[in-house]
Amino acid sequence: MSLTVVGSIAFDSVRTPFGERDRMLGGAAVHFSLAASFFTEVRPVGPVGDDFGAAEFEVLERRGVLTDDIERVEGGKSFFWRGRYEYDLNVAHTEDTQLGVFGEFEPKLSTASRDADVLFLANIQPDLQQKVRAQCAGARFCGLDSMNLWIDTAKDSLLAAIAEVECVILNDAEIRQLTGEPNLARAARAVMDMGPQAVVAKQGEYGAALFTKEGFFALPGFPLEDVRDPTGAGDSFAGGFLGYLDSHDGELDEMSLRRAMGYGTVLASFNVEEFGTERVAGLSREEIDERLGTLRKMTQFEELPAVAE
Amino acid sequence: MSLTVVGSIAFDSVRTPFGERDRMLGGAAVHFSLAASFFTEVRPVGPVGDDFGAAEFEVLERRGVLTDDIERVEGGKSFFWRGRYEYDLNVAHTEDTQLGVFGEFEPKLSTASRDADVLFLANIQPDLQQKVRAQCAGARFCGLDSMNLWIDTAKDSLLAAIAEVECVILNDAEIRQLTGEPNLARAARAVMDMGPQAVVAKQGEYGAALFTKEGFFALPGFPLEDVRDPTGAGDSFAGGFLGYLDSHDGELDEMSLRRAMGYGTVLASFNVEEFGTERVAGLSREEIDERLGTLRKMTQFEELPAVAE
């Protein structure tokens, strides 16, 4: 039971109609790790600059995240993203991106991180995703995220990376773009034909859908009246999803994948309640399980009684 | 047990990447009535021209729809809509709308249609919706649809109409526009504060969400690899939803509303499989119940076993 994630470790400056934060802890591997930390031992792999200090490490370590594979590059600067959201939080604008040390990133996995049972390839250049996957040959389940940039500029490499993973976790627009198929059910089948046994279509506030060879499952987003900052929701989803799967001893069958979807949905919903990592860093497992129970009740409808025609 | 719907009875010319049809039977009251006909006696109320002939009446009457309140205006022309959909069927373009006899429509309800237990005010001018609601004072449950046009041009009248109904059934974008609130959970609560006990947010391929004072429920759209024509999906949803509620003897509580959401989802999914009314007109109750069972399985996840932290 161990989980490795490779992806960005960053500072984010974010402005939404509900507040703003300057240079707060962020990045895909960070949001993923904090979400997964409620289920398993998780090792983020990625570079930071010497602007990444004790306070940032402490947020991760307080949640039991193993930070040995975070590579601190002397004289370098950490990945930085600045963005703002409109009053309709579905509309985001990137104002600045500075790759910093991430621009020269060559993943070097320790023995411990290579021995992971479960692996998450967050949204990084797909050549790097392939290299990491090859180093973690023993992982029983590997998830992969990507983005429109790599579909546009490195599609062949991305397809090769996808062929080597068990599960693709993408926004539904990205799944359509990747396959050139506007019908999502067909698009998901086309992705499974590339190799993966499961496709998770992230649908923002609408929730997420799971396509497998056996079936289809979908969960709505957890309804929230107060959403402060959507940044990191997708990675928090992936952290809850893969974190649960890593903690699950048995076979990763349809029902365990569905339960993992539930945990992913719940972690994403907590993530967006406050800025950056603020909510998830201070969360408890009890709150997670309580919300999962609520989510389950929100999606149930009874067996049908005999109905008069 | 009887259901009245007031709305358009029309001819539609539709082109999608999967085919086209010229002047096929359509309109909100038609799609609604065919969907509801599997559950209850339904009376569509609305005007047609003398271009509306025996063939059109026969489609309705074969499904047991009571057509006495369809008003045939001599020398008039039926409502006509021409539209096309892109390869991505979420993108629709209206090419022509001719109101015909619908432009002068003043609802005249027979005693039988006024005595309805359940009423659906399809998307028509909200002054007319108010008049119909007043004529059906005894209905125990009334649903209302509308559109951006009336929110823009007749908002006060629409708010007055909404105050008199039990359930609003709108697209989520319309619910946001109506309330000026981008957060859907808040927007739905604002609609309930206007009077209705329930708000159904239609979300296209993402399904539909139900907001009530007691809770939240959501269903994904039924996943289909072959969608030919999305026209009428929302009205088919409303027909399944209100048709089931009318057939339900007991109290219209949370669980009966959830079951109704299931039937709405199923009828909408059948509707889009073929052009216009073609699929629903030839459907069987067995097919409906079978798909509802499948939908239920697609949304279930087990109670959680004890999970190692």
Image (cartoon, coloured by chain):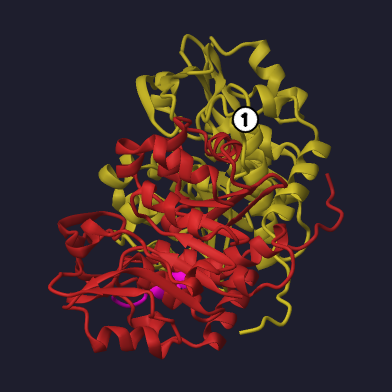
Chain colours: A yellow, B red
Q: Amino acid at mark 1?
A: Asp
Q: Is residue A102 left or right of residue B215?
A: left
Residue A115 visible at all: no
Residue at x-position 43% and y-position 52%: B131
Q: Is residue A89 or residue A179 the one in the foreground?
A: A89
Farthest residue to the front: give it. B111
Instruction: Mark 1: give few (<14), some (14-19) or many (20+) Cα within 10 Å.
Output: many
Disc 1: which residue:
A69
Q: Is residue B243 left or right of residue B145?
A: right
**Disc count in the image?**
1
Q: Is residue B274 magenta?
A: yes
Q: Secondary structure at mark 1?
A: loop
Measured from the top left, where is residue A108 in percent x and y?
Answer: 53, 34
Q: Is residue B152 magenta?
A: no
Q: Which residues are magenta?
A: B267-275
Residue at x-position 66% and y-position 21%: A278
Residue B192 versus residue B221 in the image, above or below: above
Residue at x-position 71% and y-position 82%: A306
Residue at x-position 19% and y-position 55%: B94
Measured from the top left, where is residue B226 in percent x and y?
Answer: 35, 74
